[in-house]
Amino acid sequence: MAMATANDGQLPLAGLANIGQIPELRKRILFTLGMLIVYRIGAHVPTPGIDPNALAAFFNQQQGTLLGMFNMFSGGALSRLTVFALGIMPYISASIILQLMTTVVPQLESLKKEGESGRRKINQYTRYGTVLLAIFQGLGIAYGLESMQAGGLSVVIDPGWSFRMMTVITLTAGTAFIMWVGEQITARGIGNGISLIIYAGIVANLPVALAHTLELARTGDLQPLFVLFLLVMAVAVTGFIIFMERAQRRIPIQYAKRQVSGRMMVGGETTHLPLKVNTAGVIPPIFASSIILFPVTLANFAPWPILKDAAAWLSPGHILYMVIYGAAILFFCFFYTAVVFNPDDTADNLRKYGGFVPGIRPGQKTSEYLDVILTRLTLAGGLYVVAICLLPEILIANYNVPFYFGGTSMLIVVGVTMDTAAQIQSFLISRQYEGLMKRVRIHGRT
């Protein structure tokens, strides 16, 4: 496999200064910011019937666990048990289930091939699945909260079915609203709405994590040199993530010359097909976290000791957690890459328009060649994502380091930032072309 090269064909960041000059782009950005502000406000609206002091004491005991990761993805809403406590995780879980089912259920596979209408139908099924999962998780959390105590205080003020029903309705409605906000951002804003919601939750808690780290350094729990090492490591890992996210393998493509309209010859140019090292982006760690968080969250809230022991083994820092988490990330790297890139379709399109890879026969041989290269790239990209996500587990297992320095959160923050910036740059480029075409004046010969 040839060495991947960094993508150097993007618009310079200096072009982002033109954002304010394009009204439509400015409206999209303001709409996105407005929706994220609404989401953050909702993350502070508490669910009725909860003692906040007892709940805060319980979550102070869950730092560095998977429940702490779930709380990070919800932007701290779970630790306060707000209306957005479930976050967007039920939607992600439902999306995973639907995408897996499209590979085994013929009806869903045919819907996927129907284009826009089939995609809308699958999205509708995903919404239904999100509501069902939110009801199930909300009921499990309600039962668990009733048996939960911290510091001699009961978390639930008045247990019973009235509290359970109120909790289920509140949490399910909150998840449905977040799902709607994410879809609105994708349709009317800029960037991927679901990813931006997770991004906003992580970034909102970053100042708290930094303050907690500085407090540990002040009290002597962490040495100042170790804190400096953490900051340097965060900068180095961020730079490495940026490099790997832009890295790609360029497959040379040659187009044959063909004669059209009499003697006019077209084609014959040489271009390339870019294949990213990490085609799946930030999706694998999000999917893997969702898969592990779903049963562990119920185990943390359930009163049965065997489930609590299982949740302890699946906490960050344990070998079993690292193995399962790494394997899940690697699986979703291959799975999601197979969903977004089909070598057979790419080979057929190249043959249809007279393109071919030099030295490779068009058609099936080209598809096999692309599949081999894509498999090697996905393996390299998957190992990179696994390394980024599991490297901080050593710090979590041996030192009292805030979980927000974890590789998963850094990968999501950097990846979403780059994707959103790329969409803004693409919007600017398209507008520049439109403005150029409007200024062109074609005069006929006299």
Image (cartoon, rainbow, N blue to C red):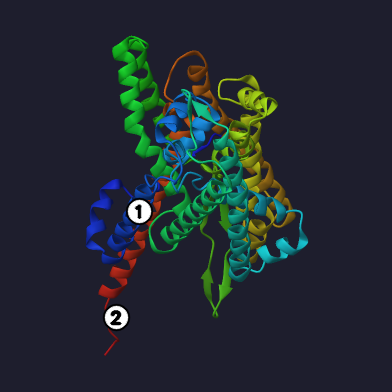
Q: Nearer the viewer, residue 55 or 22?
A: 55
**Marked residue nearer the N-terminal end (1 or 2):** 1
* Residue at 64% from the left image edge and 66% from the top image edge: 352
- Picture layout, residue 376 above or below residue 124: above
Q: Which residue has dot 1 on it?
A: 38
* Residue at 58% from the left image edge and 67% from the top image edge: 120
- Picture layout, residue 244 above or below residue 417: above
Q: Position of residue 335 (x, y in %)?
A: 66, 45
* Left or right for 422, reference 126: left
Name the secondary structure under disc 1: helix
Q: Which residue has dot 2 on it?
A: 442
Could you tell me the amino acid type at mark 1?
A: Val
Identify the image quadrant of the N terminus.
Answer: top right
Could you tell me the amino acid type at mark 2?
A: Ile
Q: Nearer the viewer, residue 237 or 389?
A: 389
- Give the number of callouts: 2
Image quarter of residue 374: top right
Marks 1 and 2: which is nearer the front?
Answer: 1
Q: Say few, some or many: other residues with alpha carbon within 10 Å of mark 1 (under 14 / 14 to 19 / 20 or more).
A: few
Task: Evaluate whether residue 287 shows in this view.
Answer: no
Task: Evaluate whether residue 82 shows in this view.
Answer: yes
Q: Position of residue 243 (x, y in %)?
A: 44, 35
Q: Nearer the viewer, residue 137 or 97?
A: 137
Q: Position of residue 421 (x, y in %)?
A: 36, 49
Query: Which residue reaches farthest bottom?
Result: 446
* Residue at 27% from the left image edge and 83% from the top image edge: 443
Name the secondary structure under disc 2: loop
